[in-house]
Amino acid sequence: MIDPDGDKRKLTRRAVMVGAGGAALAGPVLAQGLIPSGMIDLGLPGGPSLRPLTPLFPGKGEMIVQRIRPPVLETPMTVFDQGTITPNDRFFVRWNWEMPTSVNAAAHRVAVGGAVKAPASLTLDEIASAGEHVEVVAINQCAGNGRGLSQPRVTGGQWGNGAMGCARWTGVRLKDVLAKAGVVSGATRVRFAGLDVPLTDGAPQFIKSIPIDIAMRDDVLVAWGMNGEPLPLLHGYPLRIVVPGWFSTYWVKMLATIEVLTGEDDSHYVAKTYRVPTQPVSPGDKDFATVPITAMPPRSFITSHADGDTAALGQPLTLRGIAMGGDAALSKVDLVGSGLELPCELGPDEGPFAFRRWTVTIPDVSADLTGIGVRAANVNGAVQPGTLGWNPSGYARNVIERITLRAQ
Amino acid sequence: MRHAVILPIAAALLLAACDRAPTVVFADAAITLPDDPADLPDLPGRDAVIANCTACHSPSTMLQQPRIPREKWQSQVTKMIETYKAPVDEQAIPAIVDYLVAVQTAQAETDGGIAPSP
């Protein structure tokens, strides 16, 4: 759709450039030359589970390196213990195709076209003055967050649970930007494309669409601000779509095109991938119906303790963590497992789409706490399940996450 | 519920400016990403994988996958060619698949993880 650099970035096999020299099998295969500041074990069943940590990506603090190119960086779980807003320098990063590394602000345009009355090509200033400036605190979570923990394992990006973050997003409403071009009646969906394009001719561009009623929501934004700062390039400068309550796949970065559709979206990343089964499936099942992955279910995590930590025998123990309602406000969080079922106290409410702190105190630790976890529920009645809703792409993991604490 | 969290923030600024001029400044931006050393374990077929499989993504895309059978690797290569239009040399495919299977066999022997160097 958009190809700012023309053929320059197109790929032929002969154009491949790589470093020389074989890495020893036991070497840090991923990040040699990146000087990892350490390694982290993501606890992925059966492995490979170790990943390098590095602070060397521009504007980032220490991040888990899933992939250098295109960048895929995961947030260490310890960050989520520090607060409910994820700092920009620790926020996860995920690109499907090579990302542009520069943006010329004056030259940047957002094309608004398709089923509109008057197609428009908007400058960044025109976007910023398209309507009232609004802020929303919302969680941005990769559809594949936690995929690496799936059992049985599935192929794809092998994330732990750190492909999520919560930020304060600032922008204008998408509907105000759409109004600049005028949506025709009969519009069904609104599709977005960014500056990131495939390296090969005929390969699918990462474009995504949302239903028109979602696009017209008051809290769906064309955003330029992330936690009070301009969006970092790694997070989609100059503009990205924000769809509170929906998985990150729709939050298109480096927004360059908005296209109003009047039918279904048959593009690759909507019609072929980022889809979930309509019914529970088992490994090996074939030919089941699927729908695009959309709204997020509730999730919660213990952040004060990690699996294998110790707890003082005969003492009270306070646990702490974060929880989310998904596409609706959180209603409650319970500590479960090891014979316990204790309601947790919830921290300040920063809106239905934000992380919320929880704390709970076990009055007396009398034995090892085996397989304890927290279970979040939202106001729509969705509750985290006790067993994994396995699917072949490892999407939308929200099983209760359990840890074991040794009493001593 | 949802509407309660939206905070109009520019109203005051807009009033002060007496028009709808943007209060946001967009500057040019550029970053430099770390180099990708494209390091791969030294086993037969490595050159074929480097030549055919590292143009669009770092080797970690392959090296971090859970252990999968040969046929699954074969279908991953087919997916790269058919879906993502990867320019793969047909004749190199057996060597690529052999390599990926061999890497996973070796990985399984190092505790399932890629150990850091000493």
Image (cartoon, coloured by chain):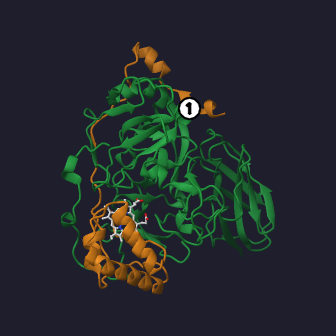
Q: Is residue A302 visible?
A: yes
Other residues around mark 1 within 10 Å, as few (<14) / some (14–19) / many (≥20): some
Q: In which quarter of the image is the N terminus of chain A?
A: top left
**Figure disc tally:** 1
Q: On what subunit does the disc labeled 1 rest?
A: A
How far across and how far down the image is residue A346, in percent? Answer: 71, 47
The residue at 31%/84% (across/down) is B43
Foreground: B10 or A243? A243
Residue A226 visible in the snapshot: no
- For chain B, the rendered hue is orange
Q: Is residue A397 left or right of residue B95?
A: right
Chain A takes which shade in the image?
green
**Quick one: which residue is furthest to the top in this view?**
B18
Q: Give the camera-side residue of B55 and A93.
A: B55
Along the viewing direction, whichever of A186 and B113 lies nearer the viewer: A186
Name the residue located 48 percent from the left edge and 77 percent from the top edge: B68
- Which residue is drawn at the image coordinates 63% and 60% (left, top)? A304
Vertical order, A125 against A258 (above or below) = above
Q: Pick whichever, B10 or A367, lies toward us.
A: B10
Q: Name the residue under label 1.
A: A217
The location of residue B85, given as percent across then percent down, is 31, 61
Q: Which amino acid does label 1 sit on?
A: Arg
Q: In this view, does A219 lie to the left or right of B59?
A: right
B33 lies above or below A221: below
Judged left or right of residue A338, residue A284 is: left
Identify the image quadrant of residue A213: top right
Q: Position of residue A332 (x, y in %)?
A: 74, 48
Q: In which quarter of the image is the C terminus of chain A?
A: bottom right
